[in-house]
Image: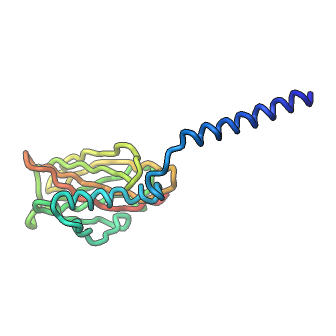
Amino acid sequence: MRTLIAIAVLTALGAVAGTVWVGSRVREETVVAHPYEEGLQYDALRRARLARERGGGAAAEPEPAACELSAGPCARPLPGGGEVTLDLGPRPLRTMRTLRVNVSLRERGATMDGAQVTVSFEMSGMDMGKNETRLSPSGRGLHVGEGVLVRCRSGRRDWLATVRVRRGAGPEATASFPLRVEE
């Protein structure tokens, strides 16, 4: 019996040693010093790179003033004119629950009708899968729909809601809103 146990232990140790040896032969060097932290900064670095490539120099667009969607509606200017206001509820905002999504569009002080509006939710530097909702027009520049924010396995609760507005055959305009959810 002891002989069988000794053989099993030696076999297991041999397997571990073989794995370590093979791993040392096929090991790849780390591309970046801190992959997790740099992954979290990926979107900001990509935006800065795109701004430089478009001739914007090292400076990217200034970040809009802070607005906390978990406390109430937030408004952002739309490129090309107009303003979009995003409101999510019920509050507190939580994962894995149906979320009411309301988007209000205004241009030069008047409501903006006739636009197609979608809202997507993502996490910076983390693939959470496609999470996009097409909103239905409700009149007077208001578009409504529902969505769900999934729970992140890492425990992160920071999200980015991106509103996309398309008017007729014109280009798509976007506005982004950072938000935090309760667990």
> 159 left or right of 28?
left
Q: Quadrant of the N terminus?
A: top right
- Where is residue 55? Give x, y as percent: 15, 61
Depth order, front residue of 158/89: 158
Q: Is residue 23 above or below residue 171?
A: above
- Name the image colouring: rainbow
- Where is residue 64? Give x, y as percent: 25, 69
**Residue name at image x 16 percent, y 54 percent:** 173
Depth order, front residue of 23/144: 23
**Residue name at image x 20 percent, y 57 percent:** 53
- Where is residue 107? Give x, y as percent: 10, 62
Q: Quadrant of residue 125?
A: bottom left
Residue lying furthest front: 25
Q: Quadrant of residue 106?
A: bottom left
Depth order, front residue of 159/8: 8
Residue lying furthest right: 1
**Residue name at image x 8 percent, y 46 percent:** 168
> 11 left or right of 146?
right
- Where is residue 19? Give x, y as percent: 65, 37
**Residue name at image x 36 percent, y 51 percent:** 122
Q: Quadrant of residue 70?
A: bottom left
Report the label total.
0
